[in-house]
Image (cartoon, coloured by chain):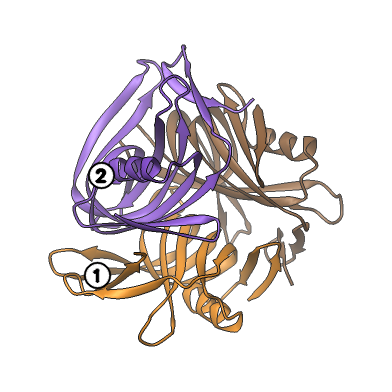
Chain colours: A orange, B purple, C brown
Amino acid sequence: MNYKKIDDIYLLCLSEGERVISSIESFAELEKITSGFFWAVGAIKNVELGIFDIEEKEYIRAIFKDYYEIVSCHGNISVDPETGKHLIHTHISFADKQFNIHGGHLFEAEVTVTFEMVFMPVTVPIYRNINPKFNLKLWNVV
Amino acid sequence: MNYKKIDDIYLLCLSEGERVISSIESFAELEKITSGFFWAVGAIKNVELGIFDIEEKEYIRAIFKDYYEIVSCHGNISVDPETGKHLIHTHISFADKQFNIHGGHLFEAEVTVTFEMVFMPVTVPIYRNINPKFNLKLWNVV
Amino acid sequence: MNYKKIDDIYLLCLSEGERVISSIESFAELEKITSGFFWAVGAIKNVELGIFDIEEKEYIRAIFKDYYEIVSCHGNISVDPETGKHLIHTHISFADKQFNIHGGHLFEAEVTVTFEMVFMPVTVPIYRNINPKFNLKLWNVV
């Protein structure tokens, strides 16, 4: 993981074999990030995805084992008010060798070639509180 | 709909049952938004999509009734110079329970769990004028 | 190609028949762009895509000849330190008339109706160096 700050944003670059979500967590901790937004392009494999099942109130999960070209990757870094820990919320879509697209909520993925991410910090923490109906931590932006 | 301004951007959070496009319209009116750009993640159902048919010069429309995980959602708020009203232009893609992706121009959708949006305002209005060939209101950024 | 600067960002609008990547290259040269990030919505045809084959170390290529609605388009402008020339790295996904999505690395595409792009410049150049393993120019953000 390499990164640097330019103006008000960070550029973060991951290399072959690095894991996307755990790298963003490390970055957030190392840089004492308050909260903020990111997006990325790059290439990944072993993608662990989820689709939230609103009836069962849990994620349907799948692993995509091939290697893929990311076509969109968006997320935000927020803070759990109980633990003070960063929460990384990321949605992704990616193309297979037939140029078909798959995607969903990203649990984790492994970088194959590169992962070029822009992170736009904000100076006030974005908190998430448990929503009891869905048992998910949702934004508190009141 | 909850939102707050942090630094130069707005965070907007929609809850179960709220409608995406009409909520963004209300937000733009309430906050007297000049113009700007947004992106979002979240989960939706009853998605009204369009693909512009360049031969027929109208949108092919479809409604996706299931519930979905948004994988990308991008748009801008501009101004109709004739009416002074906000125009919300949004394109979206979303994953179904098989992790397949569908998408297009977004007419409207209903939030199922949450909709986490970032809005980046600009201080000069972006105007749209009618393009007579396509009968669409396109950016005027000359 | 029309564009204008508002606050710290550029709006760039392409019209029917203009080419996406070569227009962004012209824009970068005309405005003496250092480096930065962009995203866009719009409609395109004759889309030249690639998926990087990590075993063969070259792009699998395909051309999508129909016309499509862009659902996500993200990229960055960086600089080749050897030539000083701009490098445009773009990933895209787009919907066909059945609302199915295709996408990958974008080599080039032709605008059908419009292409509405936001460009966020940074004041320090982002350089790319050759990665010998993949024979690709990757970010140098150390």
Q: Is residue B59 visible?
A: yes
Q: In what element is the residue under mark 2?
A: strand
Q: Is residue A70 visible?
A: no
Q: Are marks 2 and 1 in contact (CB under 8 Å)?
A: no
What amino acid type should be assigned to the residue bearing mark 2?
Ala
Where is C133 relative to B10, above or below? below
Mark pair 2, 1: CA separation: 21 Å
Give the percent coordinates (x, y) of residue B48: 25, 38
Q: Nearer the viewer, residue A76 or C6?
A: C6
Furthest residue toward bottom: A83
Give the percent coordinates (x, y) of residue A119: 57, 64
Residue ID at (51%, 55%): B9
Badge 1 density bin: few <14, some 14–19, many ≥20, Cα 10 Å: some
Residues at marks 2 and 1, common chain?
no
Give the percent coordinates (x, y) of residue B138: 49, 24
Q: Nearer the viewer, residue B115 or C95?
A: B115
Judged left or right of residue C22, residue C83 is: right
Q: Nearer the viewer, mark 2 or mark 1?
A: 2
The chain ID associated with circle 2 is: B
Judged left or right of residue C7, residue A38 is: left
Give the percent coordinates (x, y) of residue A140: 34, 68
Q: Which residue does the numbered mark 1 point to in the structure image?
A: A59
Badge 2 density bin: few <14, some 14–19, many ≥20, Cα 10 Å: many
Residue ID at (78%, 50%): C34
Q: Quadrant of the C terminus of chain B?
A: top right
What amino acid type should be assigned to the residue bearing mark 1?
Tyr
Q: Quadrant of residue C110?
A: top right
Residue ID at (31%, 41%): B21
Q: Which residue does the numbered mark 2 point to in the structure image?
A: B109
Where is A100 relative to A77, above or below? above
Name the mark on residue B46: none
